Amino acid sequence: GAVVSQHPSWVICKSGTSVKIECRSLDFQATTMFWYRQFPKQSLMLMATSNEGSKATYEQGVEKDKFLINHASLTLSTLTVTSAHPEDSSFYICSARVPGEQYFGPGTRLTVT
Amino acid sequence: AQSVTQPDIHITVSEGASLELRCNYSYGATPYLFWYVQSPGQGLQLLLKYFSGDTLVQGIKGFEAEFKRSQSSFNLRKPSVHWSDAAEYFCAVGAKTGDSWGKLQFGAGTQVVVTP
């Protein structure tokens, strides 16, 4: 089946620094990718939807200048958390969609100290 | 606006017993409905989905779900639970958009604990 990978799987960064998370569709091309955020023992909250070659669409309440999303190719989307703070610590999950299917990555655990 | 409710936050079931997880949705038209499973620290795995047709949907790992329009429900069932079924289960709804669906709205999740 189709595989979505994320890198890194786990990252620790210091407050004030930026961190980039990559999401790749390994054996298929995805025109649409989604980024979700999940707090411990909570549901997934959609942060943004990105389409290849165009600007991401952010959900209400998500700071687009803080969570930079780039969808440069049909197989790669990146999420950059800029000037990270401890409250940005969370589990970030990407998802890639093709007609009729949506696949989820394994997630990236971000801890900001 | 679409929404999903999973009334049970936590369910404990004995291994070998049956399991039913409830999901209620709110959406004006026919929704696309999904059940996902998430193991600790992992992403989501699709168990099954419903778009149209037969209201009883078979999924992977022995799971099935039944769409009941009159009750706005899409409950997940498994006749006999295995210890490996311990995980978090999420119901999700998407609005039909062309041949696909729009962004998914997830329920709060149900934590399933399996006891020996």
Image (tube, coloured by chain):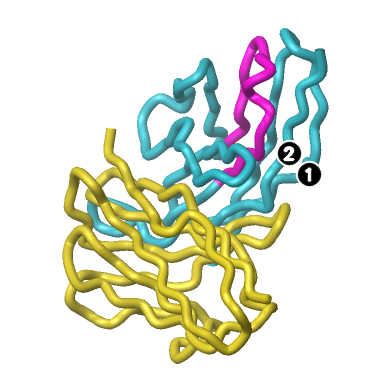
Chain colours: A yellow, B cyan
Which image quarter holds the N terminus of chain A?
A: top left
- Foreground label between 2 and 1: 2
Q: Residues within 10 Å of mark 1 (few under 14, many from 20)?
A: some
Q: Quadrant of residue B51?
A: top left
- Write the residue at 70% across / 46% down: B6
Q: Chain of mark 2?
A: B
Q: Are marks 2 and 1 in contact (CB under 8 Å)?
A: yes
Amino acid marked by disc 1: Ile
Q: Give the percent coordinates (x, y) of residue B48.
A: 45, 31
Left or right of residue A23: residue B75: right
Q: Give the percent coordinates (x, y) of residue A3.
A: 31, 42
Q: Give the percent coordinates (x, y) of residue B8.
A: 78, 41
Residue designated by label 2: B111
Q: Chain of mark 1?
A: B
Left or right of residue B35: residue A101: left
Left or right of residue A4: residue B90: right
SS at badge 2: strand
In this view, the residue in front, B104 or A81, is A81
- Write the residue at 50% across / 63% down: A36
Q: Quadrant of residue B13?
A: top right
Question: Residue B9 got which mark?
Answer: 1
